[in-house]
Image (cartoon, grey):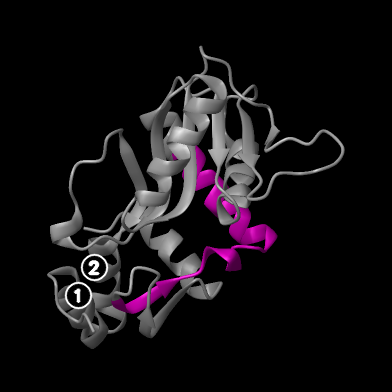
Amino acid sequence: MLSPAKRQFIECLMKEGVLKFGSFTLKSGMVSPFFLNFGNIASAEALDLTGKAFANLISESFPGATHLYGPPYKGISLATATVMKHPNRQLAMFYNRKEIKGHGEKGVFVGHTPKTSSTVIMVDDVMTTGGTKLETMELIEEAFGVKVAGVVVAADRRRKQEVTEFPIPLKSLIDLPDLMEYMKAKDPSMADVLNTFYHGGING
């Protein structure tokens, strides 16, 4: 059973044009029947709802969090929206530039950067393979001597055979089975397509 909170979030994704159906070739080369563009979470209403959803999940799953890290670029706005809605008003956020700045403070990281005693949670848009997240975790550890304690994504889009253990705790607002459940009432034929994809089909 899809929870009211998850249903509301998916409806927000539909309304904002984040969730689209069709035929999309992903960075990995995989052909997917859906695509999630979280860059479209840009309205005050959508950012408010998404920030609250992330904040609730993080406060429940990682109550000791002191810092949120948002990977460039979409993770930056998601982490910002989240920290503004989190009940811990001392919770800080930071992000990194993709290119090293050659003037001013010349820093790679921006915001309230962590200490070795900090508890850092990564906030990002989607989980597909996790490769980029692992690389970023290493970057943070090298820069600050602190390991990322957990990852929270808006959507876990991995297929059934790809849902393997991640090195650190991973949470998501929604996953592919949630989308399948939502589409059963909205568009049964699309729910069937998603089900086929989830179980390893539709790969061009």
Q: Earlier in the sequence, mark 1 or mark 2?
A: 2
Q: Which residue occupies 36% across, 48% down?
A: 172
Question: The N terminus appears in which quarter of the rendering?
Answer: bottom left
Q: Secondary structure at mark 2?
A: helix
Dividing the picture into quadrants, the one containing residue 59 is: top left
Residue 2 horizontal/vertical position (percent): 27, 58
The residue stretch that appears in magenta: 31-56
Q: How many marks?
A: 2
Q: Residues within 10 Å of mark 1 (few under 14, many from 20)?
A: many
Report if residue 42 is visible in the image: yes
Alpha carbons under labels 1 and 2: distance apart: 14 Å
Dividing the picture into quadrants, the one containing residue 42 is: bottom right
- What amino acid is at disc 2? Glu
Horizontally, residue 163 falls left or right of residue 152, namely left
Question: The C terminus appears in which quarter of the rendering?
Answer: bottom left
- What amino acid is at disc 1? Phe
Q: Camera-side residue: 203 or 22?
A: 203
Horizontally, residue 18 falls left or right of residue 177, namely right
Dividing the picture into quadrants, the one containing residue 152 is: top left
Residue 179 horizontal/vertical position (percent): 30, 67
Query: In the displayed structure, would residue 97 be above or below residue 31?
Result: above
Residue 147 horizontal/vertical position (percent): 43, 24
Q: To which residue does mark 1 refer?
A: 197
Q: Camera-side residue: 45 or 158?
A: 158
Residue 145 magenta-drawn?
A: no
Q: To which residue does mark 2 refer?
A: 181
Q: Which residue occupies 59% across, 51% down?
A: 72
Residue 38 horizontal/vertical position (percent): 53, 63
